[in-house]
Amino acid sequence: MNASGSNSLKLPLRGIVPPMATPLLDRDTLDRAGLERLLEHILAGGVHGLFILGTTGEGPSLSYRLRRELIDQVCRQVAGRVPVLVGITDTAYVESLSVARHAAEAGVAAVVLAPPYYMPEGQPELREYLSHLVPELPLPLYLYNMPPLTKVPFALDTVEWAMEQGGIVGMKDSSGDMGYFHAVLQRLPRRPDWSLLIGPEEMMVESVLLGGYGGVNGGANIFPRLYVRTYEAAAAGDLARAREGHRRILRVSGGLYRIGKHPSTIIKGIKCALACLGVCDDFMAEPFSRFRAPERERIESALQDLEGIEDLK
């Protein structure tokens, strides 16, 4: 078990780690030119890491072949500029392990795992699963708490157990439950190398002001500099600047994530915005489809309203 990962991973991980969208041309073809543009666009914003094959990256909907291709291209292009984290969530134990091993060979810094979905496991079963998987992983592991999609949370007693496992080095919490977030935060002194990052961007400033380590925020695909500057303001205790950044982030989520009426609308909004900006294609992995003309027009209008939003002084 390699508990240190890539040389580019410094523990605890702090900052903005965008959950990168996956540019696609069709259901099993990467938009390689778009991926190159997207990576450079995100990195130019000064982000602190990159998370691929997560929820925003439509990881569970992609073929294993395409996941490996994405990992390889991202690692080649990033070339150690920031740590790359890779989602390995799967219903099949051996596939999670296989993707993790490929990621390690490609130069990834760490892997990220949500509870296996479809058949909900009990917390004792989840701990036993992790006790088998973690020793076999070639990279450090971040837990991904996403009960709205997986149906199973990492309960607090499981988090306490995880903090005793050397190969587990942090968590992304996308529960949207600030009470839960605070409870995990109170347990961090027992593991100084552990990171606690938050998913919902509307909560990022509050979480950092209260001691959180940063955000894994989808809007940083589009406006990375805004999220980085807002995080930096919150981390420095600059309340006026942090409040202004928070207000702008709420404008992003309000303008781009509420156009559709299904849970997929956030990913559709992000990918459509990137397409409207000429960054990459907005093809969605099945069973979802890109926004049609009426929704796209609303995204274009929202982007006009958001012009200059990254100019946070």
Image (spheres, grey):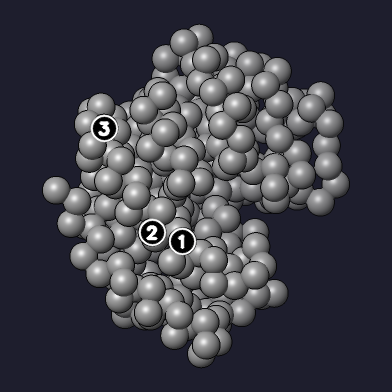
Q: Identify the amino acid type marked 2.
A: Arg
Residue 284 spot, x, y in % from top left: 57, 75
Q: Residue at the spot x=14%, y=48% of the render? A: 313
In space, the residues marked 2 and 1 are separated at their CA atoms by 5 Å
Instruction: Say what secondary structure mark 1 lies in.
Output: helix
**What is the x, y in percent for residue 308?**
21, 65
What percent of the width, then of the height, locates residue 306?
Answer: 30, 67
Report the residue marked by disc 2. 251
Residue 194 on image: x %, y %: 46, 22
Residue sitting at x 37%, y 53%:
249
Q: Residues within 10 Å of mark 1 (few under 14, many from 20)?
A: few
Left or right of 207, for residue 100: right
Observer able to see residue 95: yes
Task: Name the side, left or right, on which 112 lies relative to 288.
Answer: left
Q: Amino acid at mark 1?
A: Gly
Q: How far apart, in angstroms, are the residues tagged by discs 2 and 3?
A: 18 Å
Disc 2: CA contacts within 10 A as few (<14), some (14-19) or many (>=20): some
CA distance for labels 1 and 3: 22 Å
Residue closer to the observer: 179 or 275: 179
- What residue is rendered at 58% in x and 20% in y? 183
For the residue pair 10 and 265, the one nearer the viewer reads as 265
| Rendered image quadrant of residue 253 | bottom left
Give the residue type that dot 3 points to.
Answer: Leu
- The answer to which of marks 2 and 3 sits earlier in the sequence is 3
Q: Quadrant of residue 114?
A: top right
Q: In the drawing, what numbered circle is on residue 239?
A: 3
Is 93 placed left or right of 309 in the picture? right
Q: Is residue 192 above or below residue 290?
A: above
- Whether pointer 2 and pointer 1 mark residues with C-beta atoms closer than 8 Å, the reply is yes
Which type of secondary structure does the marked residue at label 3 adopt? helix
Q: Which mark is residue 254?
A: 1
